[in-house]
Image (cartoon, rainbow, N blue to C red):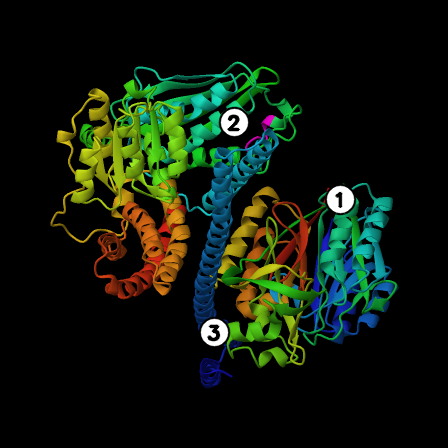
Amino acid sequence: MSKYALLLKQLEESLLPYLKEEQAKDLLTEQLAKLKKEFIKNEFKVKRTIQDKQITKQILEHTITELKIQSENLKHQKALTEEQTAFKEQLFANVSHELRTPLHGILGMSHLLENSTLDKEQRGYTEIIRSSADNLLIIINDLLNLSKINAGKTLLLNEPFSFENLLTDLNGVLTFKAKGKGLNLVITNPPNMPKFLMGDRTRLYQILINLLNNAIKFTEKGYIALNVYVLRKNESTIDCQFEIKDTGIGIKTGQLNSVFDSFTQLLDSKKENSLEGVGLGLNIVKKLVQLMNGKIKVKSKVGQGTTFSLNLSFDIPAASAIKNLTLHKSAIVIPTAWQDKKILLIEDNEANLVYAQNLFAGGHITLDIAKNLSIAYHKVGQQLYDCILSDVKLPDGNGFELIAKLRGDHSAINQRTPIMVLTASANDKEADYAKKLNVQSYIGKPFPPQLIISEMKKIFKDNNVTISSLQTMQRPAKNRSPEPYFAHLEKNFKNKPSLQIEMFEIFLNQLPMAIKQMGKGLAENDLKVFHYDAHRIKSTINIIGLPKLKPLITKMDEFCYKKINIDQLPELYTQFKMQAEKDIKIILARKEELLVAS
Amino acid sequence: MQSKLIFTISLETLSHQIQKTIQDEFQPTLAIIFASPAMGLEALRVLFNKNNIQIIGASTAGEIGNTAIQGAGISLLLLDPPTSHFKIIQREANYESSPEIGVQIAQVAQTYFKNPAFIMVFSMNICGDTMIDGISKTLNGYPSIFGGMAGDDMKMKESYTFSNEKVSSNSVTVLILDNDKIAVEGMALSGWQPIGLENKITKANNNIIHEINEEPALDVVKRYFGDYFANSLNEDSLSLGIAQYPLQIIREDSYVLRAALDSNESDGSLLMAGPVTTGDSFRFSIAPGFEVVEDTIQGFKDFAKEKPEADALLMFSCVARHMSLGPMIEEEIEGIYNVWQKPMAGFFTYGEVGQQSTGTSHFYNETCSLVLLKEL
């Protein structure tokens, strides 16, 4: 019995004897019974409330503990997932690199093969090798691209770019391809379209070139058109539509819904084996368009053609942003007047070749390449060039040998052709020699693209420009803050991460071989072997930047060239090798950053 | 339809009161009886057979009569509907046969009435959930199904149902009513609120939970409730046990409460008052406070706005609810009785059957299920 029940009972017992009337006794008993009931209820309520509060507290404490455990588990899971993703990406990047490296080798060799004397059958085989390797490269690049997009690692840039320049590039790259199939490529750009836009030029280019390449691939006669329409425009933004139209085979209605799916290919029944890739291109295009908050549609009629329409919005850059861009870009815009110019580039270094090819891409210039002196001799004997760009150190001799022969041979068709010497070992002695040989420009590597263009402008303006104006065009050394690791590369290929990646790959390919050969040269006391590879790798290092490797290789190259301080070469070589190991890691990391960003 | 409540703790009084009501020119044809097993259920059956009154009965864990509650007694409703308006059937069943028995009940009901309604009581070895499913699916709609799982004064050994034929601890006894003649309406209200994180039943068999979150179920319960109920779980009695904090099993568009009736320390399992399924997600639940009593009464007041009339009331209230609300359960019962103020018999069950507002009937725990009977 509770304390209160006991009190009530005592109260009842003490009061009842004093009550004489039965009615009063009943009333008291009844009232006390009610009170007792209320006491019991209240007692239970208190007890129950305490119990519930304790239980609630326990459950909540447990819940907090569980949540903490779950949170820790999630953190652990997240870390694990990130680790796995990083591993997967690293693996993917490595595999991709491992695949691309031999592919570049195959492609390079097939190019060399194509330039050699081959019979018709051999040429056919070579073409198959090259086109197969090209296709494989497309697949690898597509897979890499898609993997990055799917992983959400594709970030878009939002910076000013020249839209006109983008169209010019597209035109330059695709006209030849279209003409090769007897197709007309028509690009229309309305007058009210801004010349500059804010956005990711690389991604827009990727989308458009993918769609246009597809259009060319699936069209056998007629035309390919890229029409740009302004849908809505104000001072700061623009909504526009890009229409990629072809007169090709078209797509069946049943296939239209799946054209953007991964691994979907549009089969041309007439050319079943003609398809490239694994059907990722349009999937990548759609994902990129979605990433840009745009929309893409397709309509098609079998036998009549296909039209892809994509709607995209852009900000229009402020005048100040355009001004900077114009200054930067104007230096490397190739004048349209050079459309029919034919240039011979004598260069053996893959990195320099890519660099030069990119420089002239879209400029409608015919760029002929000779990777050694023998090929160069052959070419200058066959063809009149508007300009010859020549390296000095070549696998089978010195570039000056050819220049001297040309200038001294009155019957040579290129005797008076302007020549630019591009050398990694620019020095006054060589510059003087170049002057004597009536070389128009003597430029030290690495050279900024605008320097080449401005020099060429001089050449093409006045074909008889005198050598008196010639001077060593090496960039003057300035007092400046430490050079960033990839200064030269980043400056000149700012918006071209794929090119930067390619340069890195070339370098990563060349470096181990160079180190090996230089080591061999030292071991066998063969300065020629040592110098040849040192000079070659110096050229690539200069293109990229690498401020710690650059002075070492420059010194070694200079010592070999001047045949001085030979005894210092082993020590310099050791330092170079150690630094190279560090730089490889930095390059790999930067390459991954670029891959992820792109 | 006339109705009389008899609420007593002795058979002698019961016999006397039956005679008294009959003398009052009330001729009952049907008795709905809820009685403690201690009252002698067989004697009860014989008594009503002598009086030629059809019966449906269940053993209890406490009885309800109008505003009062009691233990170890009898609460019964005497009614006088025409015998053509109802049928009583009793079927032997067990846990596994429950769905099939549900189908059979529905099929039999269809032979009697076009639109049958069901008041059913069943012993604790039967699965109320699957039996109700069997009825609902067979009738292809939302039949009115109410009732409760019989109790045994909280001994948790065996409970009984009975008819004029027999008393059995393995049976379901069903009062099938012609819903076109006698309206059977009702509602089930709980008020328990979920608390804590969502858990998953990772191993279950019928009404036994073996594992929660891939751990022995009892370990999880102990961890959640600390030492508070650790000891009481192994007691025979449910008092102060975890039954007051049932599992709120999350279903597609609703939830059902499942109270733990017992635990097995040797294998770490929990015996539940209803079926659970491997893969079920649940949260523990708790009465939000004593306002749940007011909320429940208000819920039935709202229901009365739609169904204001009744000849008699039946109440099936969970014994765990009783444990949780203590003496406050009387306030709840009184409040509900006062809404209609008609004779009301009921009992404290080991599980209740009632309708949700959606019209579907389910088997619950921790719930108060009320039935209104009204001759049309």
The label shown at residue A214 is 2
Identify the residue under disc 1: B179
User: Subunit of mark 3?
Assistant: A
Q: Are marks 1 and 3 on the same chain?
A: no
Q: Where is residue B188 drawn, in percent x and y? A: 62, 54
Residue A45 lies left or right of residue B13; in this view the side is left
Q: Amino acid at mark 1?
A: Asn
Range drawn in magenta: A256-261
Residue A470 lies left or right of residue A403; in this view the side is left
The residue at the point 44 percent across, 29 percent down is A209
Residue B214 lies left or right of residue A325; in this view the side is right
| Front residue (pair A329, A391) | A391
Specify few, some or many for label 1: CA neighbours under 10 Å numbering under 14, 14-19, or 20 or more. many
The residue at the point 45 percent across, 60 percent down is A83
Overall secondary structure of the magenta section? loop
Q: Secondary structure at mark 3?
A: helix
User: Subunit of mark 2?
Assistant: A
Specify few, some or many for label 3: CA neighbours under 10 Å numbering under 14, 14-19, or 20 or more. some
- Res B132 → quadrant: bottom right
Is-magenta flag for residue B30? Answer: no
Residue B252 in view in this figure: yes
Q: Where is residue A524 drawn, in percent x and y? A: 37, 63
| Front residue (pair A533, A283) | A533
Q: Amino acid at mark 2?
A: Asn
Q: Secondary structure at mark 2?
A: helix
Q: Where is residue A556 drawn, in percent x and y? A: 26, 57
| Front residue (pair A264, B307) | A264
- Sequence order check: which comes first, mark 3 or mark 2? 3
Eyeballing the image, is A244 above or below A58? above
Identify the residue under disc 3: A51
